Image (cartoon, rainbow, N blue to C red):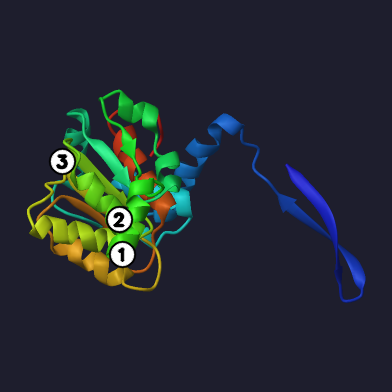
Amino acid sequence: MNIIYYMERFGGKVEERIRLEQVLPAEIEKRSFEIISEELGDILLDPLQEPVIKRVIHTTADFDYVKNLCFSEDAVIRMQTAIRNGACIVTDTQMAKSGINKKALSRYGGEVYCFMSDKDVAEKAKQQNSTRAVASMDKAALLDKKLIFAVGNAPTALVRLYELLLEGKIEPEGIIGVPVGFVNVVEAKELILRAKVPYIVARGRKGGSNVAAAICNALLYGMSEEKYG
């Protein structure tokens, strides 16, 4: 399909043609993953990590994640096994919670939690002069459930998780550490890379709630055949 439009150039109108692919709405995601595979070319990815990396690229259109995403040994298998055994996911933003496929997770008995908007979390953060992210991790630590933490925004959440690990107050099934930003973001991720826990971490400044949700969904979709990637 060609679209013709006119633009001003050097004082006169010039005809420009833009060629668009004709792709049915239901085929857009499939075509997107085909393009990602084409652009990756001869880059070889670990078969277990590949769906995660490709889904993050699909979400961000950023191929830097090929080298930025770091996986602990057997992280994908261990987190998927935890999900099959009913593990729940705790996020640090409502955006990440909204983006995770809760229907897919519920098939295994899991739920998605985000305590950032809870009144008691806000009160505790104020009392302790800390962030809501810190207080929400403390609240999550009290859950009597198998947990995977998916952090896409707050480096303080990762720092608190690391502290809770050292204190022996949590034994998470995995940590997805992908906050985005400039202040303490790189450092917080490096702490998780040192932790003795399954992790998927986006090294450096890049990340976000959308990336955290994409990784969770990639894990879920990898357990079935309902999505591409």
Q: Earlier in the sequence, mark 2 or mark 1?
A: 2
Q: Going by the image, does 61 lie left or right of 180? A: right
The C terminus appears in which quarter of the rendering?
A: top left
Location of residue 137 in the rendering, given as x and y in whole percent from the top left corner: 25, 52
Amino acid carrying mark 2 in the image: Lys
Q: Going by the image, does 122 lie left or right of 46? A: right
Q: Which residue is mark 1?
A: 130
Secondary structure beneath disc 2? helix
Amino acid carrying mark 1 in the image: Ser
Cβ–Cβ under 8 Å for marks 2 and 3: no
Amino acid carrying mark 3 in the image: Arg
Q: Which residue is mark 2?
A: 124
* Residue at position x 15%, y 61% in the image: 163
Q: Going by the image, does 221 lie left or right of 25? A: left
Q: Going by the image, does 9 lie left or right of 146? A: right
Q: CA distance from mark 2 to mark 1?
A: 8 Å
Cβ–Cβ under 8 Å for marks 2 and 1: yes
Viewer-nearest of discs 2 and 3: 2
Would you place residue 50 above or below residue 103 in this image?
Answer: below
Q: Is residue 205 visible?
A: yes
Secondary structure beneath disc 3? helix
Would you place residue 119 above or below residue 189 in this image?
Answer: above
Q: Earlier in the sequence, mark 2 or mark 3?
A: 3
Location of residue 222 in the rendering, given as x and y in whole percent from the top left corner: 30, 34
* Residue at position x 33%, y 48% in the image: 120
Cβ–Cβ under 8 Å for marks 3 and 1: no
Would you place residue 93 above or below residue 104 in this image?
Answer: below
The N terminus appears in which quarter of the rendering?
A: top right
Would you place residue 41 above or below residue 106 in this image?
Answer: below
